[in-house]
Image (cartoon, helix red, strand yellow):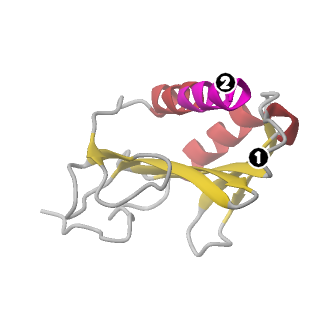
């Protein structure tokens, strides 16, 4: 049995080919201004800057970070920066002491513990789910 990783990490290595596939896929969308694989945070991850014009003026910045592991664990963190606050959530699959392996840290603060959930096994389906939920969030922002 693998011990829980309290830091949101997985016991497996990062799946670089999957990150590179997601990078290529996201760069092809109008929603994405930049997508680069980086290790600036001390973890190899896909760092995505979302297109500012996609959002109402009240959103100063929006980003997505993706870590995908060779055992299909993942951490996908969405964040918006507003003038006086931030709004964020995180979709996770990894062993941990606070939730089931699949879980969501819900908006607006992505608290721990999160909510137990169930995610698709294919990374493309997970990405589709995340992008659909971001799309709903953006629609809500424009309606406010």
Q: Main secondary structure of the magenta part?
A: helix
Residues at marks 1 and 2 touching, judged by CB atoms closer than 8 Å: no
Q: Quadrant of the C terminus?
A: top right
Q: Residue furthest left?
A: 1
**Residue 138 among those drawn in magenta:** yes
At 36% from the left and 61% from the top, the residue drawn is: 10
Question: In this orientation, which residue lies closer to the viewer: 71 or 78?
Answer: 78
At 53% from the left and 29% from the top, the residue drawn is: 133
Packing grade of label 2 (10 A; few <14, some 14-19, many >=20) is some
Residue 80 screen position, x and y as percent:
67, 50
Q: Earlier in the sequence, mark 1 or mark 2?
A: 1
Question: In this orientation, which residue lies closer to the viewer: 52 or 26?
Answer: 52
Q: Residue furthest bottom?
A: 42
User: Where 132 sits versus 117, above or below?
Assistant: above
Residue 76 image label: none
Res 126 seen here: yes
At 62% from the left and 72% from the top, the residue drawn is: 41
Res 77 seen here: no
User: Where 125 sits versus 19, above or below?
Assistant: above
**Residue 35 among those drawn in magenta:** no
User: Where 12 sits versus 54, above or below?
Assistant: below
Question: In this orientation, which residue lies closer to the viewer: 80 or 119?
Answer: 80
Which residue in the protein does label 2 denote?
139
Residue 119 screen position, x and y as percent:
34, 33
Which residue in the protein does label 1 denote?
59
Residue 92 screen position, x and y as percent:
39, 49
Q: Residue furthest right?
A: 53
Residue 131 screen position, x and y as percent:
59, 30
Q: Which residues are magenta?
A: 133-144
Left or right: 73 in relation to 80: left
SS category of the residue bearing label 2: helix
């Amino acid at each position: 049995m693998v011990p829980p990783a309290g830091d949101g990490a997985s016991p497996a290595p990062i799946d670089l080919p999957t990150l590179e596939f997601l990078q290529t896929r996201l760069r092809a969308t109008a929603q994405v201004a930049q997508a680069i694989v980086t290790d600036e945070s001390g973890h190899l991850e896909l760092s995505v800057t979302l297109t500012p014009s996609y959002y109402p003026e009240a959103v100063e910045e929006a980003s997505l970070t993706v870590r995908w592991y060779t055992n299909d664990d993942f951490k996908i963190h969405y964040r918006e920066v507003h003038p006086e606050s931030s709004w964020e959530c995180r979709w996770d699959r990894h062993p941990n002491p606070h939730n089931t392996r699949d879980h969501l840290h819900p908006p607006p603060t992505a608290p721990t513990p999160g909510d137990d959930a169930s995610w698709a096994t294919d990374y493309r389906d997970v990405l589709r789910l995340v992008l659909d939920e971001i799309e709903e969030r953006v629609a809500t922002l424009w309606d406010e």
